[in-house]
Amino acid sequence: MGEERGGGKVGYGYPDGALERLQEEELGILKEVARVCAQLNLVWFMDSGSCLGALRHGGFIPWDDDIDVALPLADYRTFCAEAPALLSEGFGLYTHAETANYPPLWAKVYRKGTRFMSQQMADAGFEQGIFVDVFAFSRLDSRPRTAKRQMRMAARWQRLSYLRCFARPKLPDGLPLRPVFQLGCRMAHGVAHALLSPAFIERRFERSFSMGDGAGPWCDLFYPAYGTFETETLFPPVDAAFAGERLPVPHDADAYLATMYGDYRALPPEDKRGAYPPVVLDFGDGINVMEQAR
C-alpha cells in the first residue's frame, strides 16, 4: 500500500522482467474485480498506492508490486458474499472468515494456480496466489474521541491477527532494539495462537465498525494510520487513466492522496524506491522465479 519502501535498486529486488510480468498478471485480476463490481452494481475505487500510481504515473508506480482497491463497507460485504459465485474460472477469493491460516482481515482476489508468498506467509503455512487487495472504508463515529477509539481497536485486532499467524512479523527497518522486539513478537505469537481463534479476532474487529454512530468521516479500518476522509473526498468516484484502462479513483483524489502521503507528486529518494519481493513467485508453471534473484 505504501509509497516508500527501503532497499530500492534497479529491478527492485526482482529478476529481470519479473516485476513487469507480475504487474501484468495483477492488472488481469483487477479487470476481473472491476467486472464483478459492475455486475453487482457496487461502488469501488483504486486505493492508496494504486491511486497514486494512476495520478502520478498513469499506471503502476514503477516499483510497486501490488494493486489495492476499496469499497464502502456495505458494498465490501456484498462483494465478499457474492464474488465467489461470480468470479470467472481461474480466480478465487480469500477472506479471513473462510480461508484457513489467512492472516489479513481484508479480502484478496487471487489467480488460482499461482504463488506469491512472503516469508511471513510461508511461516504461517499459507500458499498465497498472486492477488489484488480488497479493502473496506467505513464511516466512523461523529465524536472524535470515539472515532479514535475505533481506529485504535481496528489496528489492535489487525496486529493480533498477524501475530497469531506469524512468529516473525515484518518490522520497520532501523527499529531500535530490534532483537528485543523480535523476541517479544515470538512470545506474543505463542500466546495469541493458543488463546485467540480467528473467529474471535474477526468478531472483535467487527465491533470497531459497529460501535459508533456512523455519522463521522470515512476511514480504511484495515489501515487507519492513513487518516480520515470526508464523504465528498471519496464519493462519487471518478475515472482516471491506469495502464491503458479508465478506472475509478476517489472523487477528489488530490486531497485523498495529500492526506495519505503529503506531497505525493514528489518522487521518493532512489534508495526508498523498492518493493518487498516475495520468497516465492510462481506464475503457474511451477517455477519459482525468485530463485533467479539469489
Image (cartoon, rainbow, N blue to C red):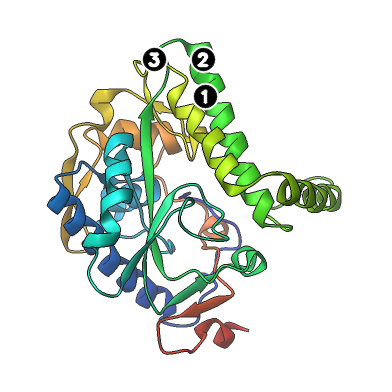
Task: Mark 1 and mark 2 in contact? Answer it, CB < 8 Å.
Answer: yes
Disc 2 versus disc 3: nearer the observer? 3
Q: Residue at x 52, y 62 (%)?
A: 274
SS for dot 2: helix
Instruction: Tell me the kind of residue under disc 2.
Output: Thr
Q: Earlier in the sequence, mark 2 or mark 3?
A: 2
SS for dot 3: loop
Q: Earlier in the sequence, mark 3 or mark 1?
A: 1
**Residue 17 numbered tag:** none
- The answer, for residue 170, to whether it is visible in the render is no
Q: Residue at x 16, y 48 (%)?
A: 40
Q: Looking at the picture, how far across and down is residue 275, in whole percent? A: 51, 63
Q: Looking at the picture, how far across and down is residue 225, in whole percent? A: 52, 34
Query: Can you identify the residue that label 2 sits on?
Result: 146
Instruction: Tell me the kind of residue under disc 3.
Output: Asp
Query: Can you identify the residue that label 3 sits on?
Result: 213
Q: How many marks?
A: 3
Within 10 Å of the Cα at label 2, are there few (<14), some (14-19), or many (20+) other Cα atoms? some
Q: Quadrant of the C terminus?
A: bottom right
Q: Looking at the picture, how far across and down is residue 270, in whole percent? A: 52, 59
Estimate the spatial distance between the alpha carbons at disc 2 and disc 3, rounded to whole Å: 9 Å
Instruction: Tell me the kind of residue under disc 1.
Output: Gln
Residue 103: name its quadrant: bottom right
Query: Can you identify the residue that label 1 sits on?
Result: 150
